[in-house]
Image (cartoon, rainbow, N blue to C red):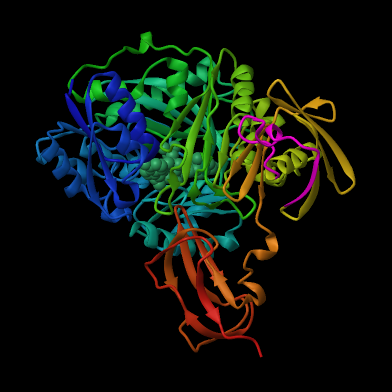
């Protein structure tokens, strides 16, 4: 076993790797950017090396600086995590040339799976079923359109260098093909520097089922499947293992195909074979096809750990240090069921825009596994993926694991940033999901119901008013009541006005719009109008939050004080933190309502900002290439006459 390793990543995955290294007695070196100097992964590691500016290209993507840090600290191996350099074969070559071990597959295995078209061709030869389609070299538009006709609509156009759902277009009719091809090629060229695409049959009632594999460079085993069908715009939201409705026959066929795929490229370490499955008539062994291989540890690996009892990072370290595969196929079994929900700093009502903020309050449930890279007080910065945590639950049956997931999401508390927590909670209560009827279209079909914000009821409003009046905090302490006196105050909360009247210690009456809530503190918990609320009141600067069930946040500032700068449409503000990719206008230029002003990119999306009205550009306040926070003015138009 190694005595010291360097982790070339940040966030939850860096912390996850450090946890296992520590368990194995392996010392750890973290690397960090300017934005992460006080991050959790830096605090957890035995040593940490600063590698540059906040932009990934100035730090976590600087292979040379990372290798230099490993050599300087005496680390023997580098764990890449996921994302960043994890699937970069040139980095693997450089690591090995420096005399260090890359904890992962060989550069040649990564290259073999790097482009989707070549990977599909290779898998076909290895006898692994691939999605019917065209994955050849001819990129001529007419030829590709002809291929689509032969395959039969609907078809999917995919960037061969694609990832993260980018460069992918669903085409339902031949008449839409040419335009979709052009936009997929354009997006692929910008995102990956490679416009090549492949054409695939669009599988109906698609389910995404992937198989975890693990190889020693010659032989491989599989650690069963994960179902990742709950997706929003091709991004996974909740994952589970095993797949609902899986049969022994289908599992054996998928497992064998995955092992064949891994062995065909001499795979070493942890990898995932992603299959698309036609779920229109249940799971059938002749209805799954290879989509792509991810040559790294996957975000959702914890659900596999939960059902197999295996620590995949431990296996990675053991195999990379020269040990044989820690278990044979016959020794691997599934016990129970597991779910993982990805908790993000995201503005769901605004269309799932990435958000930032300082996490003034953060609480994860007991009884669930929470993999996180942040602590209370830490900041979700605009530079990286806005993931806050992964919440993982396990149970003897799917129903038990799912009800634990619901409970865990209800017990999760975040203040200081908006999150997708309510969306995850709604999804965990979705009836079709509960029945195991999952497909990649589920979220899209029910998006309105899943994102409908629950309105706070009287009890929640009353408790928020108590918080605002300074009568309750944290776990419901008696702050205000200690200096009890019969007292009536008025508090303003997000446009609500509440009258709060203290009747006795631990007893208050709150009146909102004529409705009366009788609030009593009984054994540390709040009862409203004779019923236990189960709620917790949390005060953070400028806000009061009421948690569980649900999460409600109320601004204490008077909404009228908030600058409504954008009034009149003269100012275009950045709707989210992100990178200004392009600015299309200059001062003095006349624009019409709807004209493109600029493009903003945040993690996996591009947003075009358009003029709200006709006018003349007075000032361009942002330049292409600059990083901006949410709410920053980017373009100002001249005042209207
Ligand atoms: P999966 O592993 O299931 O394919 P995704 O593709 O959604 O999951 O997530 C991997 C992506 O997460 C990377 O491609 C990258 O965009 C992003 N990412 C990279 N590094 C990190 C990190 N340290 N923390 C969070 N997200 C990261
Ligand atoms: P990425 O590299 O962006 O992860 P994938 O090829 O893995 O791209 O596909 C991402 C998602 O797109 C899948 O999980 C699935 O939801 C959908 N998808 C991909 N291929 C097909 C297909 N042939 N038919 C239906 N859906 C598909
Ligand atoms: Mg994929």
Residue 501 in the image, given as x and y percentages of width and height: 81, 41
Quadrant showing the N terminus: top left
Please identify the quarter of the rendering in which residue 615 is found.
bottom right
The image quarter containing residue 406 is top right
Residue 252 in the image, given as x and y percentages of width and height: 45, 18
In the image, residue 482 lies at what x, y percent?
A: 68, 32
Q: Nearer the viewer, residue 164 or 58?
A: 58
Left or right: 465 in relation to 172: right
Would you say residue 478 sits in the magenta stretch? yes
Q: Can I make out residue 123 in this image?
A: no
Residue 63, above or below 337: below
- Relative to 446, residue 321 above or below: above
Task: Name the residue: 35% across, 41% down.
Answer: 39
Left or right position of 66 against 275 = left
Q: Is residue 55 visible?
A: yes
Q: Which residues are magenta?
A: 469-492
Q: Nearer the viewer, residue 328 or 127?
A: 328
549 or 208, which is in the foreground? 549
| Farthest residue, direction right | 514
Taking the spot 74% from the left edge, 43% from the top edge, the residue there is 465
Quarter occupied by the C terminus: bottom right
Residue 217 highlighted magenta (yes or no): no
In x, y percent, where is residue 633? 51, 71
């Amino acid at each position: 076993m190694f005595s010291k390793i360097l982790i070339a990543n940040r966030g939850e995955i860096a912390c996850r790797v450090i946890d296992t290294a520590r368990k194995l007695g392996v010392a750890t070196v973290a690397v960090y950017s300017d934005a992460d100097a006080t991050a959790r992964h830096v605090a957890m590691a035995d040593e940490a090396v600063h590698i540059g500016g906040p932009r990934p290209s100035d730090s976590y993507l600087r292979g040379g600086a990372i290798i230099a840090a490993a050599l300087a600290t005496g680390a023997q191996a580098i764990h890449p995590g996921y994302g960043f350099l994890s699937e970069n074969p040139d980095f693997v070559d450089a690591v090995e040339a420096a005399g260090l071990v890359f904890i992962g597959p060989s550069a040649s295995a990564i290259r073999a799976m790097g482009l989707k078209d070549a990977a599909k061709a290779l898998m076909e030869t290895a006898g692994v079923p691939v999605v019917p389609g065209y994955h050849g070299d001819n990129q001529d538009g007419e030829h590709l359109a002809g291929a689509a006709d032969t395959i039969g609509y609907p078809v999917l156009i995919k960037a061969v260098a694609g990832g993260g759902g980018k460069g992918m277009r669903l085409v339902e009719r031949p008449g839409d093909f040419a335009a979709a091809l052009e936009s997929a090629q354009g997006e692929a060229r910008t995102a990956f520097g490679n416009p090549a695409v492949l054409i695939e049959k669009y599988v109906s009632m698609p389910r995404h089922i992937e198989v975890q594999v693990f190889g020693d460079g010659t032989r491989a085993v599989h650690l069963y499947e994960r179902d990742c069908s709950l997706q929003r715009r091709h991004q996974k939201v909740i994952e589970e293992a095993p797949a609902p409705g899986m049969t022994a026959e289908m599992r054996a066929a998928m497992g064998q195909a995955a092992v064949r795929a891994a062995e065909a490229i001499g795979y070493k370490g942890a990898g995932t074979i992603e299959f698309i499955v036609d779920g229109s008539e249940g799971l059938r062994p002749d209805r799954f096809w290879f989509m792509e291989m991810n040559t790294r540890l996957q975000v959702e690996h914890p659900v596999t750990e939960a059902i197999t009892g295996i620590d995949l990072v431990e296996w990675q370290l053991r195999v990379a240090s020269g040990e044989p595969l820690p278990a044979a196929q016959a020794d691997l079994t599934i016990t129970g069921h597991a779910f993982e929900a990805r908790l993000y700093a995201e503005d769901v009502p605004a269309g799932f825009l990435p958000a930032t903020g300082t996490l003034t309050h953060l609480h994860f449930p007991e009884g669930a596994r929470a993999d996180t890279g942040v602590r209370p007080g830490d900041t979700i910065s605009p530079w990286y993926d806005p993931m806050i945590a992964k919440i993982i639950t396990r149970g003897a049956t799917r129903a038990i694991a799912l009800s634990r997931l619901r409970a865990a999401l209800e017990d999760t508390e975040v203040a200081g940033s908006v999150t997708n927590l309510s969306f995850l909670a709604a999804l965990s209560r979705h009836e079709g999901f509960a029945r195991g009827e999952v497909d990649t279209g589920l979220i899209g079909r029910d998006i309105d119901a899943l994102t409908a914000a629950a309105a706070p009821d009287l009890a929640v409003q009353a408790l928020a008013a108590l918080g605002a009046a300074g009568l309750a905090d944290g776990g419901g302490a008696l702050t205000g009541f200690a200096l009890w006196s019969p007292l009536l105050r008025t508090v303003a909360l997000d446009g609500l006005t509440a009258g709060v009247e203290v009747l006795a210690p631990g007893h208050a009456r709150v009146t909102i719009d004529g409705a009366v809530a009788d609030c009593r503190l009984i054994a540390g918990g709040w009862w409203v109008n004779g019923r236990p609320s189960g709620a917790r009141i949390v005060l953070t600067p400028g806000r009061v939050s009421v948690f569980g069930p649900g999460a409600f946040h109320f601004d204490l500032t008077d909404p009228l004080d908030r600058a409504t700068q954008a009034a009149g449409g003269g100012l275009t503000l950045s709707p989210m933190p992100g990178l200004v990719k392009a600015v299309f206008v200059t001062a003095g230029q006349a624009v019409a309502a709807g004209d493109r002003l600029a493009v903003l990119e945040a993690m996996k999306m591009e947003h075009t900002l358009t003029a709200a009205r006709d006018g003349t550009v007075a000032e361009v306040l942002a330049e292409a290439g600059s990083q901006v926070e949410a709410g920053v003015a980017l373009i100002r138009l001249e005042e209207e006459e």
